[in-house]
Image (spheres, rainbow, N blue to C red):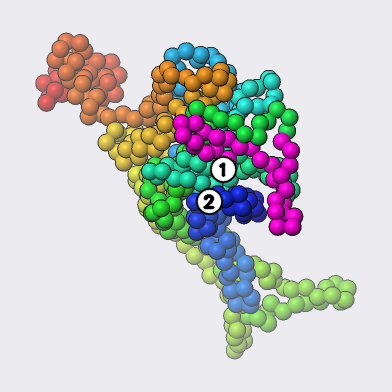
Amino acid sequence: MVVSEVRDFLEQMGYQVQTTITHREHMQLWREWYRGKVDAFHNYKVYNGVKEVKKTKKSLGMAKKACEDWADLLLNEKVKITIDSMQEHLDGILKENDFREQANVLLEKTFALGTGAFVEYKSSDINNNCCINYISADMIFPLRIANGRIVDVAFASEISNGKYYVNIHEKKGDKYRIENIIISSKRYGKYQISELPKGIENVYYSPVPLFQIIKPNIANNSDMDEPMGLSVFANATDEMMDVDEKFDSYFNEFQLGKKRIFVDPSAINVVPTVDNENTKPVFDPDDVAFYGVAGLGEDNKRKIEQTDFDLRVEQHSLGLQDSLNLFSDKVGFGTNYYVFKEGKIYTNTTDIISSNSKMFRRLKKHEIILRRALEELVRAVLYISVGQVYSGIITIDFDDSIIEDKEAERKQYKEDVALGAMSLLEYRMKVYNEDKNTAQSMLPQQADVMQ
């Protein structure tokens, strides 16, 4: 309701919202996958011979898992934001705004819904002169696009039932015009404008943008001209369905594989209770372990038959692992990133990411947009808090500790040995991960090592 109300208000003001209705529908589907349950897929019915029983497929929630992992890789505690001066001042503002925690959460939602934004503003609270809002895709309304980037934009949030806060950013020459509006639901075809809280300006200007749009650095192939970003799993819905289908089958293998009971309908009939005033069914009609088969008791045969099945755990595990490999590749991690073991999903931490791997290249690609956003955020925060445009150097150091190019390292170690900067003993300990005694015992074979 908030989206349609705000969109309608903006259009009444003469703005043209650039996001299509189709993209909003896609976002709704991505939200369902991120939540872990897609009604059209996970809810189904099973006929047990008597009636249809409603069932819900089990879900591994891989959409959320992938978004969590990308957020943790891109914006974790090891990421450093460094400036030439006022470092302590900047760190204080970021800490007051819970930046480390909230930015990571926003990045996760951004990879799920395709777009997110940081928005900075001067607070009316004298104890905190700069605030950062973390806006998810639902509340972002692009108004003007240039070279694929959102230049003018509106952000919104619901204050109370039927009352919305709208924040509009427009580029006017070399400055940005920011307008704050509080609107109430329509009366007589028009929205009512409410008074802003004390200390909040209606209109003000800034020489630097006070918002930063972030999104996965992948092309939107669902709508080529759509300015909003694409969910990181938008093209992996088939793979997610395959994963959940196999996981549900894996789960049902234990639920239903122990025993299957076929019952003649006459044995399912209700029987009187002890007081003979009421009746109750012999078997639970919602239990899919029981399956009614007409004629089972004919010719004086037994009215109940049971079958036992061999559990196909290994086949299910192998099939599920194949599906996980396809999924992880589709969302940019490459194959073998996720491992299904003992009924749970683990991240494969035994494989160190090489600098020539698909995941490394995708990680660096995503960092391009995030780096620019963080640099602009720093300039916005410093302008609001100090009142001057910061012209110094801003350095963003991302966490590359998970990246290791073994071939490049081995080549460097060989050069160090040749120069005398490293001994053969050190070489073996580093390259072959040997302890000192083992490496020492292998030194007679050193000629082979350097081949």
Q: Nearer the viewer, residue 238 or 81?
A: 81
Please say whether residue 189 is one of the residues in the magenta stretch: yes
Q: Earlier in the sequence, mark 2 or mark 1?
A: 2
Dominant secondary structure of the magenta stretch? strand
- Taking 72 as reference, is 264 left or right? right
Q: Which residues are magenta?
A: 168-196
- Taking 311 as reference, is 364 left or right? left
Q: Amino acid at mark 1?
A: Ala
Circles 2 and 1: CB atoms closer than 8 Å: yes
Residue 299 lies in quadrant:
bottom right
Residue 323 lies in quadrant:
bottom left
Q: Nearer the viewer, residue 128 or 418?
A: 128
Q: Is residue 85 above or below residue 451?
A: above
Residue lying at 72% horizontally and 73% vertically, measured from the top left: 282
Q: Is residue 219 above or below residue 189?
A: above
Question: Which quarter shows the C terminus?
Answer: top left
Q: Amino acid at mark 2?
A: Val
Q: Residue 272 placed where, x, y %?
A: 81, 76
Task: Find disc 1 in the rendering and name its residue.
Answer: 154
